[in-house]
Image (spheres, rainbow, N blue to C red):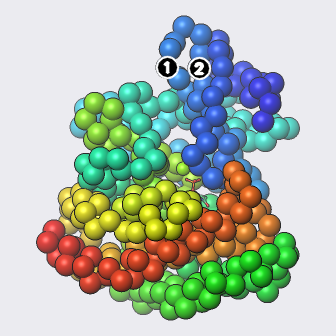
Amino acid sequence: MTDTILSFAFSKFATGDVLDRFEPITAGHINRTYAVYVKGEEKPKYVMQKINTSIFKDPVGLIANIKGVCSHIRKKVEARGGDVMREVLALIPTVDGEDFLNCDDGCFRLYYFIKDATAHQSANRPKLLYYAAEAFGNYQNLLSDYPAETLSETIPNFHHTVSRYADFTKAINDNVAGRLDECTDEIKTATELEPYAHVIVDALAAGEIPLRVTHNDTKLNNIMLDDATDKGVCVIDLDTVMPGSLLYDFGDSIRFAACNSAEDETDLTKVYLRLDLFEEYTSGFLKGVGKNITAKEIELLPVSALIMTYEVAIRFLGDYLNGDVYFQTHREKHNLERARTQLTLALDIQKKLPEMAEIVKKYI
Ligand code: GN1
Ligand code: MG
């Protein structure tokens, strides 16, 4: 994305500020994200994002979701005297009064940058996980009275693991990028783990667990933690807030943050679930959700980590087979490496399920 395009886009938002510069934020795999610095301020003042509209095909519905959810939360933050500039995302309107910019170069949105807070890439202090978990759990509580029927499904079947497996099978059969032979071992593992794909999907379909409004992308780097206290300040990356299961949010956090390594670690001896971090997250999450969790959801917490890890593994592997058309990659074979890491983690979680269940018991 050229600076000219970014500057043009920024000029279309009603900020009253003079642009200094953009700095890319590269942690996300879908949208293009930039910290925006303005004249007279040392720290970034805004975050500008180009929405990936080949993935989010209905930007109007997407922005309406975000607006609705944020105003719901803003009211609650205000009611308890919180800091609305930090604790909830705010979309800055364009000069034409729109909630996002739709121009020849794409769809852009602008938020205020959350000050004095950080989106951590890993839990270098276990306490970070406790606080992130508490905040994600609480986030779900804040949305428990949100009218779910008003939300658009921004990506259909987003965490429908069975449907994800069907996509994966199609990628194998199509083999469009001619990479099938490189992935034989990974495909074998993925096929063996397939029965797990049904667990959450079936429980939802049978009404054994409730459909809730959930975040659906609860990586540690999708929450801003306070620089001074480490406590959760603001949940970000709201593109996939949709009806879903609490287990999606819990499981995805575990796969990303209770792991000993990065999501794309290539030294697989470093890839395993850390039970100490699992315990930290579990205790924080259960504190955050409070009574808003059922016995069946509690029972499925450990296996949800396996399922979410498995699901993203087959998504990465499927994308590799499809020629890297979905996730942004930063090196050759990146998606294959990500898939290997996630499959390794899934197998380790599978071994540790009994210990994880013991840990969950301690906090209910
Ligand atoms: C994507 O955009 P980002 O990086 O927060 C993806 C998630 C995956 C994640 C894997 C819309 O999230 O589902 O779990 O990458 N988001 C979308 O890191 O597909
Ligand atoms: Mg993100």
Quick check: 121 above or below 305? above
Q: What residue lies at 65% left-to-right and 15% top-to-bottom?
A: 20
Figure quarter occupied by ligand 1: bottom right
**Label 2 close to label 1 by CB (< 8 Å):** yes
The type of residue carrying mark 2 is Tyr
Task: Name the mark on residue 43.
Answer: 1
Q: Position of residue 93 (x, y in %)?
A: 62, 30
**Position of residue 193 measured from the top left corner of the image (x, y, whole percent):** 52, 87
Between 73 and 150, the residue placed more toward the observer is 73
The quadrant where residue 233 appears: top left
Write the residue at 66% across / 16% down.
Answer: 19
Q: Quadrant of the C terminus?
A: bottom left
Callout 2 secondary element: strand
- Where is residue 204? Give x, y as percent: 44, 83
Residue that lies at the very extreme toward the top in this rendered image: 40
The answer to whether residue 126 is seen in the rendering is: yes
Q: Residues within 10 Å of mark 1 (few under 14, many from 20)?
A: few
Question: From this viewpoint, is residue 110 visible?
Answer: no
**Residue beneath the point at 35% across and 54% down:** 136
Q: Is residue 135 left or right of residue 252?
A: left
Residue at the location (82% across, 80% down)?
Answer: 175
Is label 1 in a helix, a strand or a loop?
Answer: loop
Tag 2 residue: 37
In percent of width and height, residue 361 lies at: 17, 76
Q: Quadrant of the N terminus?
A: top right
- Dividing the picture into quarters, in which one does residue 313 lie? bottom right
The correct choice, above or below, for 2 with respect to 107 in the image is: above
Q: What's the amino acid at mark 1?
A: Lys
